[in-house]
Image (cartoon, grey):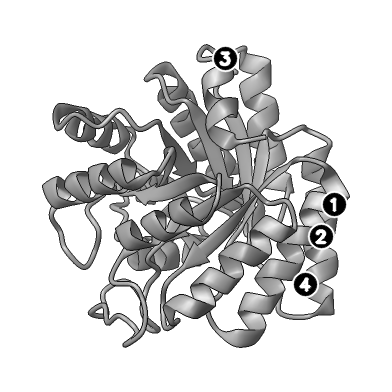
Amino acid sequence: MKILSLILQDPARPVFSVEFFPPKDEAGTEQLLEAVDRLSAVEPDFVSVTYGANGSSRDRTIDVTKRLAARTGVTTMAHLTCVDQPVAQVTDVIDHYAENGLENIFAIRGDMPGGPTIPWQAHPDGLANATRLVELIHERGDFCIGVAAFPDPHPSRHDPGLDARILKDKWEAGAGFAITQLFFRPGAYAELVDRVRSIGCDIPVIPGIMPITTVSQVARFAEMSGAVIPAPLLARLDAVAGDPDAVRETGVDIATELALELVEAGAPGLHFFTQNRSRATEEIWARLLGSGAV
């Protein structure tokens, strides 16, 4: 099923989705499949698999995406970037997804090796940006296309207005919905939506949530994504930093509180970055169900 249809079919009910990354080895594959099986039991509306542009990682992405679609029967979204790839290679991947019945693609420019603050350089025979990627996917088939959005300004630009205009460009190029990068300040989501709506863009924006399980994890991902970590949140984590179980429990509390505020603000869905583990996301979703918010 197309993800935009899932979003629109019941505006009063936010969609629930989870994201995985392609494992590096067989042990990682087993961990992933275990997480997939556990999370399938709580009935996500869709699952997604991140994309590695380099040879073996790209092949694993394609393989894992196909396996998840076959294993779970849940709507599956394939990711695609244009980092370090000629147009012909990107086109081959799009066509391969289509041949395997995958009709939802998450189109992102991707970051250069070294992270999002490294200046972007297009492949000599590649695409210039995510908008061009959306156009290419749109031209090659009847796909539902998702794109990235930034509640906190993109770390390479630090310009929230430009981020909003780029999102509108992607929507006009054929994108059906957006999923945000991780963030920790609820107001950042509302501000993003307001900026986008103020320039005439009606794209549904699903907030992305990272359950915190370790203190080092949140600092690393915040640095990579440009997400601002509020001081009170850091204080809560620092207060239990010596107790891994307490850190994890606090992280689940923080993510649940964030999700509740987002649903109350009218978010059309909640997308969880699982890091190929299921337990924290299961607990958060169970709390949300128990609260009657979803």
Left or right of 9 on screen, residue 31: right
Closer to the N terminus: mark 3 or mark 4?
3
The residue carrying mark 4 is 28
- For marks 3 and 2, give the CA distance: 28 Å
> Residue 145 location, x and y as percent?
48, 46
> Residue 289 location, x and y as percent?
67, 20
Residue at disc 3, secondary structure: loop
Front-most of residues 14 and 132: 132
The residue carrying mark 2 is 67
- For marks 1 and 3, give the CA distance: 26 Å
What residue is shown at x 30% (from left), y 66% (from top)?
129
> Residue 52 location, x and y as percent?
56, 74
> Residue 163 location, x and y as percent?
21, 50
Q: Residues at badges 2 and 4 in contact (C-beta under 8 Å)?
A: no
Q: What residue type is disc 2 on?
A: Arg
The residue carrying mark 1 is 70
Left or right of 198 on screen, residue 186: right
